[in-house]
Amino acid sequence: MTRIPRNIAAIGLFFLAATAPAAADQLADIQAKGEIVCGTIGTVPPFSFQDPATRTTFGYDADICQLIAKALGVQPKLALVAGAARIPELNQRRLDVITGTLGWTPERAKQVDYSYAYFNSNQMIGVLAKTGLRSMKELDGKRVSAQTASTSEAVAKQKLPTTEVISFQDVPQALLALNQGKVSGLVLSELMLRDFAVTSKDTNTALTVLDDSTLMIEKVGVGVRKGEDKLLAKINETLVAADKNGEIDRIYDKWFGKSSKFNMPRSFKVELIQ
């Protein structure tokens, strides 16, 4: 048997150790740099939207990012990304987490880990009031719009087999297609549709939500890279604590509840997404 000199063997072990993947500990990295980068969309009020004057991002998702940052003892940084880019940007390490209306789907769960749910969202259909459409059945043979790579797009294609789904880069473009008559309906979260209904009231493009159009109940969580168990556990711990001490209620009421124009009671629990 050929013997390998000890010094050569030692060098080999050194390089093997140097090239082996380090154990994932993004939590420590975030705390070391003093900042957590949260990916959010920025064009979907009241979840995330920008002040036109200051370009500051506000919204429910933005406040969830701030909540997590405070618990970690770091500063929050909101990075605006397109819906389709959320998971790629996270996995390419340009983001630390996703707080950007990331609804759970089996396909996404293969790519990222999800925190406990911090919001439930009904996926529904909005139409222009002037069209007289009152039922989801009336959309048979027509076209609806949805955002590319969104839960809305996926569920529309699954649940509306006789309706053509036209995808757009972002929600404003999908809404514009509806307002211009290029499509007959817009598939989106109920809260965003209700927001559009309020802001468009008494206009030529007044929007109404079809009452029979609940396509699915979507659970929204914070997206974390696979293998970052310490960070995920800390985020879950933070959400549970905020649920118990009333902080989640305060944030929800600010954007969706009694302190908002929606006045909608909270219907979700902070719990494991299954």
Image (spheres, grey):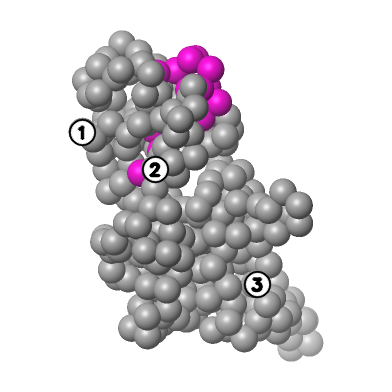
The percent coordinates of residue 188 (x first, y second) are: 41, 38
What residue sits right under mark 3 in the picture? 76
| Above or below for 262 versus 189 | below
Q: Secondary structure at mark 2?
A: helix
Circle nearer the N terminus (3, 2): 3
Name the residue that disc number 1 marks: 212
- Residue that appears at 68% across and 67% down: 77
Rendered residue at 78%/87% (across/down): 7
Q: Which quadrant would residue 260 be assigned to in this image?
A: bottom left
Vertical arrangement, residue 267 with respect to residue 247, above or below: above
Image quadrant where one finds the N terminus: bottom right
| Disc 2 target residue | 194
185 magenta-colored? yes
Of all residues, the one furthest to the front in this rendering is 202
In the rendered structure, the answer to whether residue 122 lies left or right of residue 47 reads: left
Separation of residues labelled 1 and 2 (CA atoms): 15 Å
- For the residue marked with disc 3, what is the amino acid? Pro
State left or right for residue 273 relative to residue 24.
left
Q: Which residues are magenta?
A: 175-190
Q: Helix, strand or loop at disc 3?
A: strand
- The x, y position of residue 264, in whole percent, is 32, 57
Q: Pointer 2: residues within 10 angstroms few (<14), some, or many (20+)?
A: some
Q: Amino acid at mark 1?
A: Asp
At 51% from the left edge and 68% from the top edge, which residue is drawn? 64
User: How many residues crowd mark 3 within 10 Å: few (<14), some (14–19), many (20+)?
Assistant: many
Is disc 1 placed on a helix, strand or loop? loop
As rendered, which of 137 and 91 lies closer to the eye?
137
Q: In the depicted view, which residue is nearer to us: 217 or 56?
A: 56
